[in-house]
Image (spheres, rainbow, N blue to C red):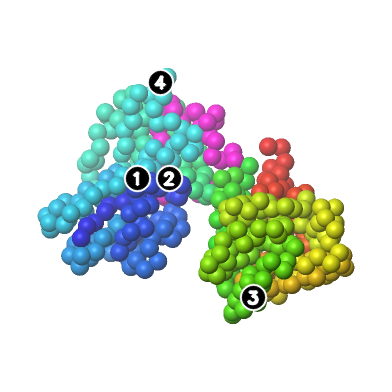
Amino acid sequence: MKVCLLGAGPGDPGLLTIRARDVLASADVVVYDALAFDGLLDLADPDAELVYVGKVAGSHAMSQDRINALLIAKAREGKIVARLKGGDPYIFGRGGEEGEALHAAGIPFEEVPGVSSAVAVPAYAGIPVTHRDFASSVTIITGNENPGKGESAHNWQALAHSASTLVFVMGVANLPAIAENLVTAGLDPQTPAALVHRGTTPQQRSLVSTIARLPDEARNRGFTNPSVIVVGKVAWLAEKLNWFERRPLFGKSVVVTRALKQASGIASALAQLGAQVLEFPTIRIRPPEDFVELDAAIARLQDYDWVIFTSVNGVSSFFDRLSLAGNDSRALAGRKVAAIGPATAGALAGYGIRADFVPEHFVAESVTEGLLRTASLDGRRILLPRAAKARDVLPQELRKAGTRVDVVTAYETVPAGARKEETITRLKEGSLDCVTFGSSSTVENFLALVPPDVVRQSGARLAAIGPMTAQTLCRHRLECHIMPEKYTISALVEAVKIFFAPCL
């Protein structure tokens, strides 16, 4: 029985603390607010109960009293409860009130601090809230005060005449009143001021002006909450220090179509370059209906001269079945092993196997030519564990070279379609800049869900990992705009970066 008050940070999932991540993974119940990044909930135990109690302007899913009662009730059921709140629970997060209610009820609790938007959001816009030359202190103020309530709780005179950086949280609606009160209290109207919307997320926008002009400029440019207002000389530093919005793919929306288990690498790489990533896995990896073929091939491994792996999934499935048979990588002693690309070679290395051959280019002809340079294939027997219903080009080329090839099913790829409607809508709106394809199957499955005409008319650039994938796009009368020289995921990410930001 325990409640943990967790700070989720301001939006960038990378700012979640290790402690908060660990609590989420072990909690029986997660009571959460409206979060800037929904993916944080993926860190929770799949069996955990998720309860939304979020509050946004004009809409409260649950009152604070009911939230307090919920936390107490769930804890009294003997459960570990994670109360997930944006930013830091104790900085305008009402975490203190929840802690008081838990204390009064005799419920043990802890507070796990989160990175506060008051500090992180200005930092992501290139504004340090303190600086030796400009400000030696910072004052954090709620911007949500009702301007019509009469006497203000703020000492505007003290704020206007302090040498402190002023940070107003959630104050866009009251920005005109905030600016007027500060200037009336004696603040120089030309004092630098900044506004940062959805800071630390791919939707971040920032505006630097003066306190006198900021309200009109913010209204003209459509700034809304959630935003942070910064007042003080440090705001001018954004011109030099705004690193976040200068990343090469900042402001670009990129669709990742890989299977969900494989998408994290490319999604993370694109996000680090500033892209807003929409994960739309078009395929799902699952075991085949049975492993009869694969198990039989593993039982007679000594009959093969080469084992060729064409994917990370094939490696994983092969070694899982090898282990279930009571064997390990030593069963491959005396066999030559080939990996179609560096990622597959890396997966093999994880099992202690160093690939004897990795082609420079993943096309069937290149694989066969490379193997022929490595050794004579005439009469050799090759095992090819791979996906069901994969293209036959590679085994055909190998057989042309005089080999005997046994193609066995190690796994299946089946269509997946989560976020289909969102993706179609955004393509029709023209709000997606790029769609990435890591294989021909991702193209086929994507276009089985999204009409090619929608893609064609959207203006989105299409990125293919290699010529086979590009040819699949071509068969659907879709142009491949981006293709790397090396057919790897890292090279594909680099090619997307160069296409959209060639000067960086």
- Look at the picture and state if 324 lies above or below 114: below
Does the CB distance between marks 4 and 3 fall below 8 Å?
A: no
Question: x%, y% of residue 491?
Answer: 70, 48
Identify residue type, mark 1: Gly
Q: Which residue is mark 3?
A: 296
- Tag 4: Cα neighbours inside 10 Å, few (<14), some, or many (≥20)? few
The answer to whether the residue labelled 1 contacts the one labelled 4, judged by CB atoms less than 8 Å apart, is: no
* Residue bearing mark 2: 15
Nearer to me, 373 or 63: 373
Dot 2: what SS?
helix
Q: In this rendering, does residue 281 appear at all? A: no
Distance of label 2 from label 3 (alpha carbons): 48 Å
Q: Residues within 10 Å of mark 2 (few under 14, many from 20)?
A: some
Q: Nearer the viewer, mark 4 or mark 3?
A: 3
Q: Which residues are magenta?
A: 221-247
Q: Is residue 496 or residue 204 the one in the foreground?
A: 496
- The amino acid at mark 3 is Ala
Q: CA distance from mark 1 to mark 3?
A: 53 Å
Residue 116, visible in the rendered structure:
yes
Q: Earlier in the sequence, mark 1 or mark 3?
A: 1
Cα gap from disc 4 to disc 3, whole angstroms: 71 Å
Q: CA distance from mark 2 to mark 1?
A: 8 Å
Q: Which residue is mark 4?
A: 132
85 sits to left or right of 293:
left
Task: Determine whether, in the image, residue 231 is placed left or right of residue 435.
Answer: left
The kind of residue on which mark 2 rests is Leu
**Do labels 2 and 1 touch, CB within 8 Å?**
yes
